[in-house]
Image (tube, helix red, strand yellow):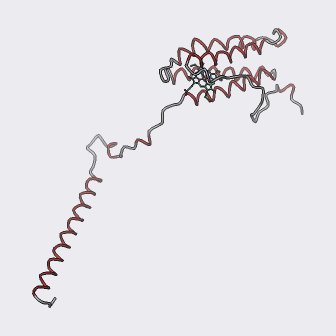
Amino acid sequence: MDGSPLERVQQSRVLTFGGIALCAIFAWAFSGSIAVSDPAPKGHASQAIPYDPASEEPPEELAEYMSRLQVYTHKLSLSVKAGNDQLAGLYLHESVALLEQIQKVFPEYERIPVAVYIARLALGAYEPLKASLAKAATERAAGELDAGMDIVMQACNACHTASQVPFIRVVRNDFNPFLQSFDPLTSSKP
Ligand code: HEC
């Protein structure tokens, strides 16, 4: 530090400026750390967790429940076709239980009175099939189970029409895409 007086003045200015800049950086970092670690007031501990809208549950989708209902309905139809009363009874039960669950989850969905429509159009439609399944096979008229199954399918489409989605048309389909045999146990081959 033994330069000319002018050089010394210049050096001290550089040092002063550097010092101010360093202080500013510390002040900024320190204020930041205080803000982050600022303890939440007593009784509001949850406020310390930052709000993250992405972590909220997405709203339930009616279509996803319908997708499951479609699977049960297809399996019900395949069981009826295979003459498997036991399995048909199981899928009838599951279909009705799912429809009742849908009523609870979606009393209304996008202004569609889902619960009321299910009560008026769908639940009763399972009764003829249920009554036929309760009979012994020998007591049934020819085609009785199929007629009962058709009533169920008509109810699906009636509700789609009432709900302004008439373009969603369900039809019976005898193709079995499942990893499952629908044949009654008694007729299964060894
Ligand atoms: C409340 C009356 C109602 C009843 C009863 C009903 N649906 Fe639906 N369904 C709807 C509505 C409304 C939608 C459209 C949902 C949306 O907009 O996301 C739908 C959508 C669907 C879809 C399209 C979603 C997908 O997975 O591709 C299928 C398939 C379906 N329903 C099958 C059925 C079957 C099978 C039945 C009868 C066992 C049935 N639905 C009974 C109202 C109904």
Q: Residue sitting at 78 percent across and 26 percent down?
A: 174
Figure disc tally: 0
Of residue 38 and residue 42, the one placed in the foreground of this image is: 38
**Depicted 23 relative to depicted 181: above or below:** below
Of residue 10 and residue 102, the one placed in the foreground of this image is: 10
Residue 134 x, y percent position in the rendering: 75, 12
Q: Residue sitting at 78 percent across and 29 percent down?
A: 175
Extreme residue in the bottom direction: 2
Residue 26 x, y percent position in the rendering: 23, 65
- State left or right for residue 28 relative to residue 71: left
Screen quadrant of the N terminus:
bottom left
Q: Residue sitting at 27 percent across and 57 percent down?
A: 32
Of residue 97 and residue 160, the one placed in the foreground of this image is: 160
Q: Quadrant of ligand 1?
A: top right
Extreme residue in the front direction: 167
| Quadrant in the picture for residue 43 | top left
Residue 182 x, y percent position in the rendering: 79, 28
Of residue 39 and residue 174, the one placed in the foreground of this image is: 174
**Depicted 26 relative to depicted 164: above or below:** below
Screen quadrant of the C terminus:
top right
- State left or right for residue 95 relative to residue 177: left
Residue 117 x, y percent position in the rendering: 55, 15
Extreme residue in the right direction: 190
Q: Residue sitting at 66 percent across and 13 percent down?
A: 125
| Quadrant in the picture for residue 64 | top right
